[in-house]
Image (cartoon, grey):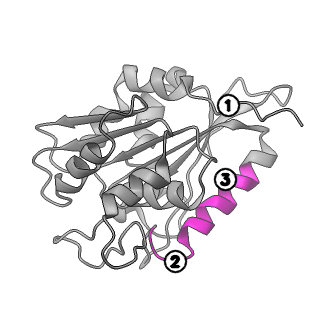
Amino acid sequence: MYVPPHWTPKKKWPVILFLNGTGERGGDGVAETTSGFGPALKAHPGRFPAVVVFPQCPAGFWWTTPGMTGLAMAALEQEMREFNGDPRRIYLTGISMGGYGVWRMAAEHPGVFAALTPISGAIHSPASIPEIPPAIDLVPGQDPFAVLADDIGNTPTWVFHDSDDPLVSVADDRRIAAAFKGRPSFHYTEMTGMGHLAWIKAYANSRWARWLMAQKLPAPAAP
């Protein structure tokens, strides 16, 4: 958990849910804060006036393993209650394995997240790590990228990947970008020179931070 120093229960707060990568799995409750969003938050806390939830994927599991997104959702719901989270401003992001988890969680929980940012992720198991379960379940013959685009709809989404990622091929994200083409709510940034660590540049991007914090779900319809 991260709670802004100026937090007060007198107002509702944006909440960022971060899903860690493979190397930060475990049960210590610390490793998931050391790579990805945690260092960016430490470097630029003023950019993220939000409560941040850091669930940790257990060792031997993946965010796309059945039941694991439920673990993350339970953590989110608990901290939403405890720290007066704003249900219209919940943001989901993740790196590598966590990028897979972003797609799965968003597809499983439509209408929950105000914005998505998967980084260095995909929806298919990569050749480098074939044991990662795919991010979405499909009926044989379905186009996974079209299904994902239908599931996500117009949820504001910004995807980051490096063209030379040696662990998770950029190919999936390129096809995802093609499936979302024409939707003003979708942004895709492909960089070079970062390998698998695209999140270092992505989370340091002040334009992305402003974009993220500006997203908000529509107000519920009047009864």
Is residue 98 in view from this perspective?
A: no
Magenta stretch contains residue 18: no
Tell me whether the residue at label 2 lies in contact with that at label 1, contact meaning CB atoms closer than 8 angstroms.
no
Task: Residue 76: give its label.
Answer: 3
- Image location of residue 10, percent across then percent down: 86, 26
Q: Is residue 187 visible?
A: yes
First to last magenta residue range: 64-79
Residue of label 1: 218
Tell me if label 2 and label 3 are in contact, CB under 8 Å: no
95 relative position to 110: left or right: left
Q: Which element carries disc 3, helix, strand or loop?
A: helix
Q: Quadrant of residue 137?
A: bottom left
For badge 3, the amino acid type reads Leu
* Residue sitting at the far front: 141
- Name the foreground residue: 95 vs 23: 95
Nearer to us of marks 2 and 3 is 2
Nearer to the camera, 193 or 180: 180
Task: Reply above or below: 153 against 190.
Answer: below
Q: Name the kind of residue labelled 1 in the image.
A: Pro
Say few, some or many: other residues with alpha carbon within 10 Å of mark 2 (under 14 / 14 to 19 / 20 or more). Answer: few
Badge 1 density bin: few <14, some 14–19, many ≥20, Cα 10 Å: few
Q: Quadrant of residue 126?
A: bottom left
Mark 2 = which residue?
A: 66
Q: CA distance from mark 3 to mark 1?
A: 20 Å
| Residue mark closest to the camera, 2 vs 1 | 1
